[in-house]
Amino acid sequence: MEQETVLELFDRYADMVYRIALSYLRSPQEAEDIVQTVFLKLLEGGMIVYPGKERAFLTKVTINHCKNLLTAAKKHEAIPLDEAVLLIQPEDRDIFYAVMELPEKYRAVVSLHYFEGYSFREISEFLHIGISAVSMRLHRAKNILKKQLGRD
């Protein structure tokens, strides 16, 4: 892929890639590394990005890289997110912390649906699970968050 095209994609989607990686990895530094890795892979070539499908493609690549990193490192402990939370509005910090404390399978669907705006069908394709599984995970995540936060 040409450098100009990759730079355009970076300008439009780097923040999205970062947020997805942060929701998986819980580490601002590792999320930044994933952003670099994803866009470097595009520069190196060998991947075809179809026009109009860039957002979905980058989401899928980001999720795959995050899963690979988690599998390789066997990282499952929570990492403080104080640096990332500085960018969030004060009234939303409690919600952000609560979402980041959810188990990975719930955190991923909440992040993709509510933060990134993906539909249930798109999330099911990204995560290789059924649409009903996406719906159930969102429902369970909302119940957990209601108990933690004590509000809707």
Image (cartoon, rainbow, N blue to C red):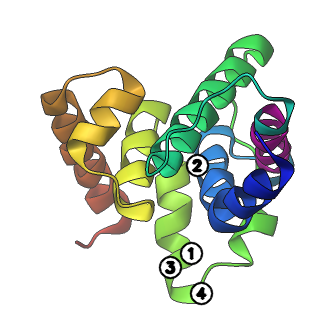
**In the rendered structure, which disc, 2 or 3, sits on the residue that comes first in sequence?**
2
Do the residues under discs 4 and 1 have CB atoms within 8 angstroms?
yes
Secondary structure beneath label 1: helix
Residue that lies at the very extreme toward the left in this rendered image = 132
Residue 64 belongs to the span the image colors magenta = no
Q: How many angstroms separate mark 3 from mark 1 (CA)?
A: 4 Å
- Location of residue 110 in the rendering, given as x and y in whole percent from the top left corner: 37, 51
- Location of residue 41 in the rendering, given as x and y in whole percent from the top left corner: 79, 32
Q: Is residue 98 left or right of residue 64?
A: left
Q: Quadrant of the N terminus?
A: top right
- Location of residue 51 in the rendering, given as x and y in whole percent from the top left corner: 49, 48
Q: Amino acid at mark 4?
A: Pro
Reply above or below: 34 against 7.
above
**Circle 1 is placed at which residue position?**
93
Please give the label number shown on residue 20.
2
Q: Amino acid at mark 3?
A: Asp
Reply above or below: 86 against 66.
below
Q: Quadrant of residue 137?
A: top left
Residue 102 visible in image:
no
Name the residue nearer the viewer: 31 or 98: 31
Please give the label number shown on residue 90.
4
Q: Amino acid at mark 2?
A: Ile
